[in-house]
Structures are given as C-alpha cells and as structure tokens.
C-alpha cells in the first residue's frame, strides 16, 4: 500500500536518556505537534532526528530506540554532536532561521556549517532511499532539509516528492545575502510541489527563482529542465476538533478548576511560545509593563501567565534571551506586584496537553505578538478552545496566521502603544463582540483544518504528477520515433518546417548572440543536401539577420513570422502589404517603457515592433508587460495590429501575419510523404494548427501544445535530425 513518507528534522517524539533509561516524550513546535494528527488520516512513515546526539547512546540504546520508534512507524536518523552543532544549531538555526525571519544581523555565514548541512541532508537522503517502497509519496518538511528534494530526485528521478516550508520565505533582498542561495534554491526545485503558508512567502520564492535561475512561472507552475513543478500557498490548519472537544474533557476541567482557584477572579492574559527571539516576548512584556503603569486600575485585577518552552538552548542568542526575559519578569513583578498579587506568572517549561488547553480555555486574552512567524498555531489553538465564544485574540500582523484571522485584534508587534491599546480594548470588549469575532474565525478554522490542509496539498501534488505524466505520454518515445524514421526513409518528398530560436538554437542573453553554431549549420546543410528534402526555416527574426546567418544554405527562409519569404535560390519577396502607420502611434509608448525599465530595448522590424526584456529585473518586467499590453491594446484598438507575448518579449505586429499562413504555399502542394514541424513558443502554435493530420509536429519544452509530440530541448531536436541524416547515409551504404 502506498504510504506517505514524512521527512523532517524534528519528529513528534523526542528521545531522552536518564540514568541509563531511554524515554520518549512529545516534541514541541508547530511542525511536530501539527503533523502528529495526520497519523489518523494517512498511512504515515516518519523519518527524522529523535532529538538526542548519538554519542549519548550505546549500541543497545540505538536498537531499543529503533524498535520503539518502528512500532510507531518512525525511522530515526541519528546524528553526532558535531553534526548537531553545525547542521542544526549552526546552519539551520544560526544562519537560515534568523535570515528567513528577517533578523539578518543575527545570521552567521560559516562555511563549515554549510558543509555539514549538506552532509546531513545527504544522510537523510540515504535514509529515505533505504526505507522507500514503490509508490510511496515523499513529503519533506522545513528549512533544515532544503537540499533534500534535489538529492532524492538525483537518486530517484521519478519519485513523487513534495516540500513544505513552515517558516517565512524572505524577500529576495534578504535571500540574496546567503552565499549558498542558489544551491538552496536548486535543492528546493528538486520537488514536484513546494508549499508555503502564505501568498507572500510563495511570491518571494518565485521571485528568487526567476532572478537566480531564470525560472519564470505561470500561475505558480515552473519548468525546470524537462520537469514541470509548482509552488503554491497552503496555510497550515490545526486538528480543530481535538482542541474544541478537549475543553469538555475531565482532566482539562480539573486543570481548569485548579488554575482558577489560584488566579481567583482576576482577568487572565495568556502568552505561550517556544522561547525564541522571533516571538517578540520581550517587546510584549515591556508593553505589559507600560500597560500597568498607564492603567493602575488594572493592578491586582489582571494576571499575565507567561509560558515559555525551552528551545535551542545550546545557542547563544537563545541563552541571552532567557536571561533578559527572566530579569525583566523579576523587575515587573518587583515594581508592580503587591502582597497577594504577582503580575506575571512565568513558567519555563512545556506543559501537558490538558494543562495547555485549560489555560487557553481560561484566558480572557491571548497575546500572540511575534515579530515574525511562519504561521503560529498557538493563535489557532486558542480560538479553537473558545467553545463559548468568549475570549479575545491579540495577534501580530507579522504572523502568517494573521491572513486567516482578520477578526482578531491585529497589532504591529513593534508598536508598544498599539499593544497597550489592544490589551485595553481586549479586556473591555463586550461579550457579544467577542462571540461574533470568534465564531467567524472558528468557522474558517474548523473548515480548513489540518486534514483539509494535507488533502489540499497532496491533491495538488497528484495533479502536478498527472500533468507530468500527460507530458511524458506526449514525448516522442521510442515506438513513435521508429515510425517517424521509417516514414522518413520511405518518403520521396519530405518537408521540414523549423523554427529557429529556442528550437534549433538555444536562447542567449542578447538576441544577436544566438547565431548558428557549426553543428546546426552542418545539420541543415546535410538535410538540404538530400534532393528529397525541402527545408524551411520559419522565424520571427528580420530578414537581414537570417540572410547573414543562413543565407548560404540551400534552404527556404521565412522572416518576421511570414512577412518576408525567400524560397530556395530565389530572392526575398514581401508576403504581406506593408501597412505600418500604426508604428508611429506605438513606438513612443514602447520607448517610454524602455526608459522606465532598465535592461530592456526596442527592436524595429519591417512588420513589427518588439520590446525585449530578457535582461531586465523579472518582477519589474512582469509588471511592465501587463501595463504595456493594455496601453498598446487601447491605442491600437482599430488599427489591425495585435500584441503577442513571447519568450521575454512583447511584440506588436499586424494580425494578418502568422506562421500558419506563411507556410500556406508549401502545404498547398499535395504530394508530401513526410512533414516534420518543430517550434517552441506561441507563434509556432499557428503553424501546428494548419498541419496535415499525419505530420509530425514537435513542441520543444515540456508544455501542452497543439503539436502532437514534445521534445525536451534544442539538444534533443538536433539529435533527432542527426538520426534522420544517418538514416539516409545508411541507405546509401546499403545500396
Ligand atoms: P513554532 O512552530 O515556532 O514553535 P507554533 O505556534 O506554530 O510555533 O507552534 C507551537 C506548538 O507548540 C503549538 O502546537 C503548541 O501547542 C505547542 N506548545 C507551545 N508551547 C507549549 C507549552 N508550553 N507546552 C506544550 N506545548 C506547547
Ligand atoms: C518551528 C520550525 C520547526 C521546528 C520547531 C521547533 O516550528 O518550523 O521546524 O521543529 O520550530 O524547533 P526545534 O529546533 O526544537 O525543532
């Protein structure tokens, strides 16, 4: 049976060893607590680090851990002290974590950390490959394993691999600071589907992919080499019912009663986090301090319960934070407290689920004010436990959860005045309003819960796989290739209709650098040398360039998508009346956009004006292309010209000219035994559309098209042409 193989650094259980005894405890953190509930809906197999360094374990311990975890369908990846220091504490948590959370000054860039990160990702890769069964889906999680999708892909090219990032993906301005940014990006691009919590993170990722590896996307779909993959937004949900139902649980009620007894009838403000500098705990406490100073009537009437879970305790920044926090709690309690009232109850530990739910349920206000947070599940868990609808969530706009929880009191976590105002507003909010806000959020959270999130994500993964399969069926596979070669050999009159850029020759930085190399010239020469062959190059380029590059060959050439035609051994003939008055209207606007878009340029051809933006900033060019398209369409509404988007160009030309019409005189000849047409972009679709049914039409690149077949690259088409030429040579030898 196909399984869902989850791979993450942290698994949902952690191993500890006390006085020689191995124990399993629950792990803390959004990823681990969140994904645990998936075991109810999927056949899970979970690979990850069990939270203990291998030096602490003897062989017997290792066996015991493996056996205990195997019973829960976990496979442990054991890591040494050095690996944990450099891969986990080092690269993952001193480089990626601060940088991706917009704390660039906390980030360190150490080559030895990077080397170990790579090495540990390889260790995880081995564990995956060793444990994988046919048809399993692989779902890699989070920033500790960003190289893993590519590593697995290299070993298992057809595997179904997905990746989810649980933290923010930073803007390109921050991401570019990372010396190993391209490796990280390529690592992620090994996946079939890459998921993010919010649209912003997905947008940042796609932007970096465009800038660093030139991968343009269409609605989040990208083509990398010969593979189509997708990046999209899937805001992670919680196991809603688990929290909502728990409120009525007997153990939770006991906890609830015990806490209420201690707090009395004071209002409770709750703050729960892993102790992490991204969570804004210090800023929150400082705001509470000011709140008490500015609102003395609340002294003695409100208690802040501050729960901090020890996290990444081996890292200096986390140790400093703990010290800072504890001295601040001491100062606030000293300054504001009185006999019988402690303003801040501080707990530095994880608490059992029942206690946590009791606290959520009791709290009048949850203060969730991270400075930056990928999602923040605490906010969602709090809302889920409010079964009577009472309670107010104060939420930072910098948490991913803010895009779904708009009915919370939203604050800027750096703005203390805003937090103070929000605390007052929350404590004084009428119950009816609390209920109204919570119900709206609860409806949303209960609908898009953890199960829906995973189903949505895995459903999208299947669709990506289906698209890949559709494309692979269209690939010119061995049987069709054989048939093609046979028909070619048998044919007495054979027609080749070949596009130039992106089909016979790969794109270059600048258009004039994409001249024909020796190999392609020889191929065309050999094809044309066979008297049974008629070779026609159909390009959008101007006739002078094509004459310079291909003029000596015994072939026909069509320039400007059909504006000019040069039949073999004859002169150029104009194929369409030159009606160019529209250029006067359009040229100034293209020039204006060129001035406003660094790196772009205008090319003027006889029948068209082309705006090139291959060398411009991709984001800016994307924006400008939309604007320009509308501007030109408005200007030319009655002029008989169209606006066409090609590979990093926008072309304005006469609508009557297209490649399909251009080949009319060739296709009108009835006696072709064999027709082969190849092209890579939208202009070639007009050609594919007019071909006879039996023609071999080939789209270069893995996208669906009117062509019957696909080949992945220029290289593959050249290889096919070479095979055809060799076929003729073989015939001659046999004769
Ligand atoms: P992060 O992923 O950065 O740790 P989240 O808010 O997304 O932050 O997730 C934290 C998870 O850890 C939640 O599911 C929460 O229930 C759990 N958790 C947080 N604090 C405690 C605590 N003191 N005791 C037990 N569980 C906790
Ligand atoms: C965040 C990260 C998780 C991580 C968790 C706890 O939620 O996205 O990947 O597991 O924090 O951190 P830790 O370092 O203890 O695994």
Image (cartoon, helix red, strand yellow):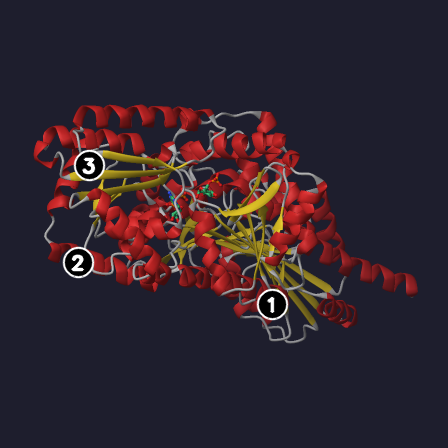
Q: Residues within 10 Å of mark 2 (few under 14, many from 20)?
A: some
Residue at the disc numbered 3? 419
Is 721 drawn above or below residue 281 in the view shown? Answer: below
Q: Earlier in the sequence, mark 1 or mark 2?
A: 2
Residue at the disc numbered 2? 435
Pick whichever, 447 or 379, lies toward us.
379
Q: Earlier in the sequence, mark 3 or mark 2?
A: 3
> Residue 497 sits in which quadrant?
bottom right
Q: Would residue 640 be seen by someone viewing this image from the given angle?
A: no
Q: Secondary structure at mark 1?
A: helix
Q: Give the side of residue 183 with respect to residue 433, left or right.
A: right
Could you say which disc has been placed on residue 607 in the image? none
Residue 19 in the image: x percent, y percent?
A: 59, 37
Residue 264 in the image: x percent, y percent?
A: 18, 44
> Residue 349 sits in which quadrant?
top left
Q: Residues within 10 Å of mark 3 (few under 14, many from 20)?
A: many
Q: Would residue 6 be seen by someone viewing this image from the given angle?
A: yes
Residue at the disc numbered 1? 666
Pick whichever, 445 or 304, lies toward us.
304
Q: Earlier in the sequence, mark 3 or mark 1?
A: 3
Which quadrant holds the N terminus?
bottom right
Is 30 drawn above or below residue 241 in the view shown? Answer: above
Pick whichever, 613 or 273, lies toward us.
273
Query: Which circle, 3 or 1, is nearer the viewer?
Result: 3
Residue 192 in the image: x percent, y percent?
A: 55, 55
């Amino acid at each position: 049976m196909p399984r869902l193989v989850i791979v993450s650094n942290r698994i949902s259980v952690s191993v500890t060893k006390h006085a020689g005894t191995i124990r399993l405890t629950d792990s803390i953190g959004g990823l681990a607590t969140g994904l645990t509930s998936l075991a109810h809906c999927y056949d899970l197999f979970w690979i990850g680090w069990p939270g203990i360094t291998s030096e602490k374990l003897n062989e017997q311990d290792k066996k015991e851990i493996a056996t205990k975890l195997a019973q829960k369908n976990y496979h442990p990846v054991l890591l040494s002290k050095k690996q944990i220091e450099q891969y986990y504490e080092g690269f993952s948590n001193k480089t990626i974590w601060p940088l991706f959370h917009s704390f660039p000054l906390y980030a360190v860039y150490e080559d030895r950390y990077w080397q170990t990160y790579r090495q540990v990702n390889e260790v995880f890769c081995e564990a995956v490959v060793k444990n994988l069964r046919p048809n399993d889906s692989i779902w890699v999680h989070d920033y500790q394993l960003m190289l893993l999708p590519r590593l697995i892909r290299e070993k298992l090219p057809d595997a179904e691999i997905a990746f989810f990032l649980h933290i923010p993906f930073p803007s390109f301005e921050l991401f570019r600071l990372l010396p190993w940014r391209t490796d990280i990006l390529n690592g992620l691009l090994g996946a079939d589907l890459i998921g993010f919590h919010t649209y912003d993170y997905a947008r940042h990722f796609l932007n970096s992919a465009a800038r660093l590896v030139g991968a343009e996307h269409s609605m989040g779909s990208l083509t990398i080499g010969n593979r189509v993959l997708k990046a999209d937004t899937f805001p992670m949900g919680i196991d809603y019912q688990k929290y909502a139902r728990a409120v009525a649980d007997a153990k939770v009620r006991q906890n609830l009663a015990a806490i209420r007894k201690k707090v009395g009838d004071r209002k409770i403000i709750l703050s729960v986090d892993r102790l992490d500098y991204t969570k804004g705990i210090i800023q929150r406490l400082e705001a509470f301090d000011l709140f008490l100073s500015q609102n003395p009537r609340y002294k003695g009437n409100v208690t802040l319960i501050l729960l901090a879970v020890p996290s990444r305790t081996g890292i200096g920044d986390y140790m400093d934070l703990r010290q800072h926090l504890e001295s601040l709690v001491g100062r606030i309690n000293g300054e504001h407290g009185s006999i019988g009232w402690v303003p801040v109850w501080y707990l530095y530990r994880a608490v059992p689920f029942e206690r946590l739910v009791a606290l959520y349920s009791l709290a009048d206000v949850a203060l969730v004010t991270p400075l930056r947070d990928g999602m923040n599940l605490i906010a969602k868990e709090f809302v889920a436990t409010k079964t009577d609808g009472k309670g107010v969530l104060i939420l930072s706009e910098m948490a991913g959860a803010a895009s779904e929880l708009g009915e919370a009191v939203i604050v800027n976590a750096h703005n203390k005045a805003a937090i103070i105002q929000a605390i007052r507003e929350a404590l004084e909010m009428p119950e009816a309003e609390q209920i109204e806000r919570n119900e709206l959020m609860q409806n949303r959270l209960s609908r898009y819960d953890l199960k829906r999130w995973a189903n949505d994500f895995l459903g999208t993964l299947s669709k990506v796989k289906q698209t890949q399969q559709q494309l692979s069926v269209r690939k010119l596979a061995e049987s069709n290739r054989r048939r093609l070669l046979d028909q070619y050999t048998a044919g007495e009159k054979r027609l080749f209709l070949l596009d130039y850029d992106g089909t016979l020759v790969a794109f270059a930085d600048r258009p004039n650098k994409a001249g024909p190399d020796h190999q392609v010239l020889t191929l065309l020469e050999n094809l044309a040398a066979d008297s049974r062959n008629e070779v026609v190059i159909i390009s959008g380029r101007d006739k002078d360039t094509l004459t310079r590059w291909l003029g000596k060959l015994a072939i026909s050439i069509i320039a400007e998508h059909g504006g000019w035609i040069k039949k073999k051994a004859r002169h150029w003939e104009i194929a369409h009346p030159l009606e160019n008055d529209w250029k006067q209207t359009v040229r100034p606007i293209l020039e204006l956009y060129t001035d406003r878009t660094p790196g772009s340029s205008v090319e003027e051809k006889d029948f068209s004006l082309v705006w090139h933006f291959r060398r411009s900033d991709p984001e800016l060019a994307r924006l400008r292309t939309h604007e320009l398209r509308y501007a030109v369409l408005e200007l030319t509404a009655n002029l008989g010209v169209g606006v066409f988007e090609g590979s990093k160009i926008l072309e304005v030309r006469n609508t009557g000219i297209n490649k399909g019409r251009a080949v009319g005189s060739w296709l009108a000849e009835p006696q072709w035994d064999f027709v082969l047409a190849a092209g890579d972009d939208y202009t070639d679709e007009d050609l594919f559309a007019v071909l006879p049914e039996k023609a071999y039409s080939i789209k270069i690149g893995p996208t669906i098209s009117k062509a019957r077949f696909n080949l992945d690259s220029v290289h593959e088409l050249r290889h096919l042409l070479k095979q055809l030429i060799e076929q003729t040579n073989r015939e001659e030898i046999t004769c």
